[in-house]
């Protein structure tokens, strides 16, 4: 047992997430390959593993790698392209025309590289993506060392990637097959939304996802207008109708859910579906306010996502956690709502549960994968520090992230990327900035 430990991380604080609220001081993580072999006090680690490599982190806080449960990675190339607009105009007047002009395999590859670099630098080890050319997203994720869920889009209208809903499905299933056996890459179905895909195809997605035991991620109840229009046409909410069509279940990830009534709560409880909260994107596009504490109180699993950089405008889950905590209190009109413990769980173990991976990631527990983010608190201006968990949610910015391990592999070492070429990413971003920027001139 002793000889199998490769290295020990000697940290000031560790927040394992499970059990909730626990903070360990002067403890170490022992890594054996891609797995956490032990969590013990410093002196025990040094005695048990005298030959293991030691990484001294004397002023550091360790947490599980964060999980971004919803985004569109390649849309980093449209960051700041269409600000200060409501969702309909944002999509129809700006984003969809820009995507028609620019999206191809190279756009998706380069945009995803920028996204992965940004997420790694702010402590995210796993991301769920929904975008065109998901094969490119998966290849970049694999190169970066991150984990990813690739939800291939399915919709009725044509794009650069597919011309019909049937072609989206066909191409998506090819992507699914191409990543079989990849430990860190999952492929899911991504029916875009109830308003962009007809009932026949929605039902087909539900059947195929069930046959493949694959997840479904869908934009749902994003705005009040969407829900009102749907009720006028169908006499019931989108969630309730999709549930009757077999699309809602324990592998379904419902993104946004800003409009929720009592029947929706019942449907989510009975189906064990998951809600993906994207607070900053919802605020920026004025989509609505998800009643997160009400969902949590009802026993519904809620994870956290940033959405894309075109509507956020960053992929920093540290900032997203703070926004989720503050917004959740305002919506619930309760200062104890969306507590630090609950919000950290949303970005870790709850998100892992939504991905079906809670047995491997989402918390620092012996036997789980060694996905670890380290925060260097030696130079933080937010002092004094009494409660590391509260500091993480209410004071951290993401700039404190110094190290990130995914499956025991070091992707960020003292703030430097190890798996991606930072200079090449900057050069690529500059090239795209000049090309796309001409649209705004």
Image (cartoon, helix red, strand yellow):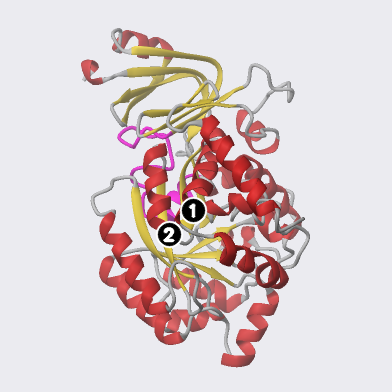
- Residue occupying image coordinates x 56% and y 79%: 263
Vertical placement of 396 versus 269: above or below? above
Whether residue 15 is visible, yes or no, is no
Instruction: Estimate the x, y position of residue 74 in percent, counting from the top left.
Output: 53, 52
Quick check: 46 above or below 335?
A: above
According to the picture, the residue beneath numbered tag 1 turns out to be 108
Question: Disc 1 to disc 2, how far (Cα)?
Answer: 7 Å
Tag on residue 133?
2
Upstream in sequence: badge 1 or badge 2: 1
- The number of discs equals 2
Q: Does the magenta-highlighted stretch encompass residue 354?
A: yes
Residue at the spot 66% in from the left edge and 33% down from the top edge: 396
The answer to whether residue 234 is magenta is: no
Q: Quadrant of residue 215?
A: bottom left
Label 1: which secondary element: helix
Q: Can residue 396 be seen in this snapshot?
A: yes
Main secondary structure type of the part rendered in magenta: loop
**Camera-side residue of 72 and 349:** 72
Label 2 CA crowd tier, 10 Å (few <14, some 14–19, many 20+): many
Extent of the magenta region = 348-371
Q: Position of residue 35 (x, y in %)?
A: 31, 31
Q: Are the residues at dot 1 and dot 2 in contact (C-beta closer than 8 Å)? A: yes
Q: Secondary structure at mark 2?
A: loop
């Amino acid at each position: 047992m002793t000889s199998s430990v490769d290295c020990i991380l000697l940290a000031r604080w560790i927040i394992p997430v499970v059990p909730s609220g626990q903070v360990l001081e002067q403890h170490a993580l022992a890594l054996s390959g891609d797995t956490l072999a032990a969590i013990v006090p410093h002196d025990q680690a040094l005695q048990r593993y005298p030959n293991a490599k030691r990484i001294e982190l004397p002023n550091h806080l360790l947490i599980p790698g964060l999980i971004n449960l919803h985004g569109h990675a390649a849309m980093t190339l449209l960051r700041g392209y269409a600000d200060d607009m409501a969702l309909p105009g944002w999509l129809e007047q700006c984003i969809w025309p820009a995507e028609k002009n620019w999206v191809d395999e190279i756009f998706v590859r380069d945009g995803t590289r920028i996204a992965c670099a940004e997420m790694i630098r702010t402590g995210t080890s796993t991301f769920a993506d929904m975008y065109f050319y998901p094969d490119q997203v998966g290849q970049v994720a694999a190169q970066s060392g991150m984990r990813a869920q690739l939800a291939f889009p399915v919709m009725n209208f044509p794009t650069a990637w597919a011309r019909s809903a049937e072609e989206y499905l066909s191409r998506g299933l090819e992507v699914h097959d191409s990543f079989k056996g990849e430990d860190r890459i999952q492929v899911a179905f991504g029916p875009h939304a109830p308003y962009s895909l007809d009932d026949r195809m929605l039902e087909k997605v539900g059947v195929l996802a069930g046959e493949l035991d694959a997840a479904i991620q869908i934009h749902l109840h994003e705005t009040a207008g969407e829900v009102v229009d749907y009720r006028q046409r169908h006499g019931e909410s989108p969630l309730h109708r999709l549930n009757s069509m077999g699309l809602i279940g324990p592998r379904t990830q419902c993104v946004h859910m800003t409009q929720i009534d009592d029947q929706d709560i019942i449907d989510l409880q009975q189906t064990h579906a998951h809600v993906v909260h994207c607070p900053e994107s919802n605020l920026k596009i004025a989509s609505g306010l998800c009643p997160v504490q009400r969902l949590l109180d009802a026993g519904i699993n809620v994870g956290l996502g940033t959405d894309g950089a075109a509507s956020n405008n960053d992929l920093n889950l540290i900032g997203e956690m703070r926004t989720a905590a503050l917004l959740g209190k305002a919506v619930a009109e309760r200062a104890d709502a969306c507590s630090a413990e609950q919000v950290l769980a949303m970005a870790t173990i709850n998100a892992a549960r939504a991905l079906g991976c809670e047995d491997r990631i989402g918390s620092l527990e012996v036997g789980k994968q060694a996905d670890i983010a380290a925060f260097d608190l030696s130079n933080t201006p937010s002092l004094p520090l009494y409660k590391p968990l509260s500091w993480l949610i209410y004071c951290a910015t993401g700039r404190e992230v110094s190290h990130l391990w995914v499956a025991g592999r070091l992707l960020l070492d003292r703030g430097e990327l190890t798996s991606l070429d930072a200079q090449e990413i900057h050069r690529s971003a500059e090239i795209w900035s000049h090309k796309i920027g001409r649209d705004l001139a």
